Image: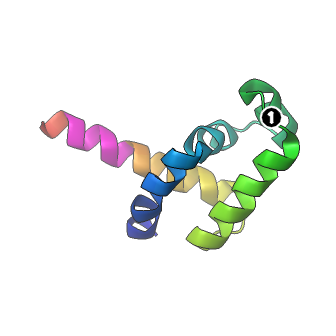
């Protein structure tokens, strides 16, 4: 899943979905994420459906694992630079 996530990450950044995913992965509800990001709950749900389909995940727990995995890869790369 890591390679698929990283390939999809650039597209997510352009759409603003990365911030949505980070907030949701931190445990916020759809409504809480919408309020925090000044988006509608439907926009949050749209990003979730899109990411779930692209990454082949089915739960927020899987989403959190993917985000944490990606963050640790980025941190490791920064440490090596």
Up the image or down, 42 lies above or below 6; here it is above
**Residue sitting nearer the eye, 72 or 8:** 8
Residue 59, position as x, y percentages in the image: 72, 62
> For residue 16: magenta?
no
Up the image or down, 60 lies above or below 72; here it is below
Residue 28, position as x, y percentages in the image: 76, 36
For label 1, the SS is helix
Give the tally of numbered discs: 1
Residue lying furthest front? 14
Residue 13, position as x, y percentages in the image: 50, 46
Which quadrant would the C terminus be assigned to in this image? top left
Q: Using the rendered view, name the quadrant where residue 35 is placed.
A: top right
> Which residue does the image show at 43% across and 53% down from the upper left?
10
Residue lying furthest left? 81
> Which residue does the image show at 40% across and 59% down from the upper left?
6
> For residue 73: magenta?
yes
Up the image or down, 59 lies above or below 41; here it is below
**Residue sitting nearer the eye, 18 or 69:** 18
Residue 4, position as x, y percentages in the image: 44, 69
> Which residue does the image show at 82% across and 39% down from the upper left?
29
Q: Is residue 39 found left or right of 6 in the rendered image? A: right
Q: Using the rendered view, name the quadrant where residue 33 is placed.
A: top right
Q: Which residue is mark 1?
A: 34
Span colored in magenta: 72-78
> Which residue does the image show at 32% across and 43% down from the upper left?
74
Q: Which SS type dominates the magenta stretch? A: helix
**Category of crowding for the residue at label 1, using alpha-carbon neighbours closer than 10 angstroms: few (below 14), some (14–19), many (at least 20):** many
Up the image or down, 77 lies above or below 53; here it is above
């Amino acid at each position: 899943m890591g390679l698929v996530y990283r390939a999809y990450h650039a597209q997510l950044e352009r759409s603003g979905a990365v911030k949505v995913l980070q907030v949701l992965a931190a445990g916020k509800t759809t409504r809480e994420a919408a309020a925090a990001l000044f988006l509608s709950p439907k926009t949050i749900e749209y990003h979730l459906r899109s990411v779930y389909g692209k990454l082949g995940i089915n739960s927020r727990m899987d989403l959190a694992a993917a985000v944490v995995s990606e963050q640790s890869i980025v941190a490791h790369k920064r440490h090596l630079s």
